[in-house]
Image (cartoon, helix red, strand yellow):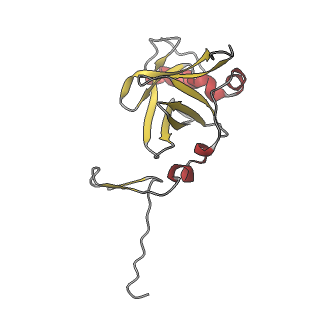
Amino acid sequence: RVGAVELQLLADCWRLTDAHDKWRSATFLWSRAVRRCFATCDEQTHALTEEELRSSPLAHKVTQLVWSWGLNREGITFTMAASAGSGQASGVLRTPWGHGTWGVTSRPDVLVAEFVQQKHMLQFAVEAPHFTSTRCSDGDKVEAQALRSVALPAATSSAQLKALWDGSTPSV
C-alpha cells in the first residue's frame, strides 16, 4: 500500500523506554492497563492464612528472609500475626512505609501485597531470592531481593541467601 507505515512495537506491557536515552520514555495508557497484562490483579485476595502458609512453598520461603524493595535497604518482612478480634494468624507485611497484608494468588510464583492502600503483585524468580513488584493501579514495577536471613542475621552473602532460598542451611 502506498503511504502506509508498518510499526512493530516491542515493549514492556506498560512502559516504552528509549534504549539510547533512558530519560526519554512514553507510558501507554488504557483502561485496566495492569489487569490486561497481569491477570492476578483482578483476583479477590485476602491476607494469608495459616493453612495457606503450610501449603505454599513460596509463602514459607519468603518468611525466612528480609527483603529490599527498590532502593530501600531497611528491609521488608513477610510475617504472620494474630488478627484483631479473631485470634487467627494472618499474613502481615512490615515495611518502612507502613504495615499491610500479604497472601497467595492462583499462580505459584506470585504473591499479593497490600500496603498504603495499594495492591502489588510480587512475581518471584525460581532460581534466586528476587522478585518484581507490579503495582496494580498503574503497572509501576520495582525490583526487590533478599537482604539477609530472619533467623541468621549474619547470612547476607548471595551464596548464603541462595542456599536459604533453595532450602539448605548456609554456613555463616
Where residue 161 sits: x, y (%)? 49, 22
Q: Position of residue 96 (x, y in %)?
A: 41, 22
Q: Quadrant of residue 68?
A: top left
Classify 103 as above or below 31.
above
Say whether residue 19 is visible.
no
Residue at the extreme front of the image, as rendered: 85
Outermost bottom residue: 2
**Residue 96 shows in the view:** yes
**Residue 82, position as x, y percentages in the image:** 63, 14
Measured along the vertical axis of the image, is residue 139 above or below residue 154?
below
Depth check: give the residue in front, 100 or 134. 100
The residue at the point 41 percent across, 82 percent down is 4
| Residue in the foreground of this view, choosing between 108 and 31 | 31
Quarter occupied by residue 90: top right
The quarter of the picture where residue 111 lies is top right
Q: Position of residue 171 (x, y in %)?
A: 51, 13
Q: Is residue 54 found left or right of 13 in the rendered image?
A: right
Residue under the image location 42 percent in, 75 percent down: 6
Judge from the rendering whether residue 104 lies leftward or rightward of residue 20; answer left or right: right
Residue at figure coordinates x 56%, y 26% from the top left:
101
Residue 52 shown left or right of residue 33 in the figure: right
Q: Quadrant of the N terminus?
A: bottom left
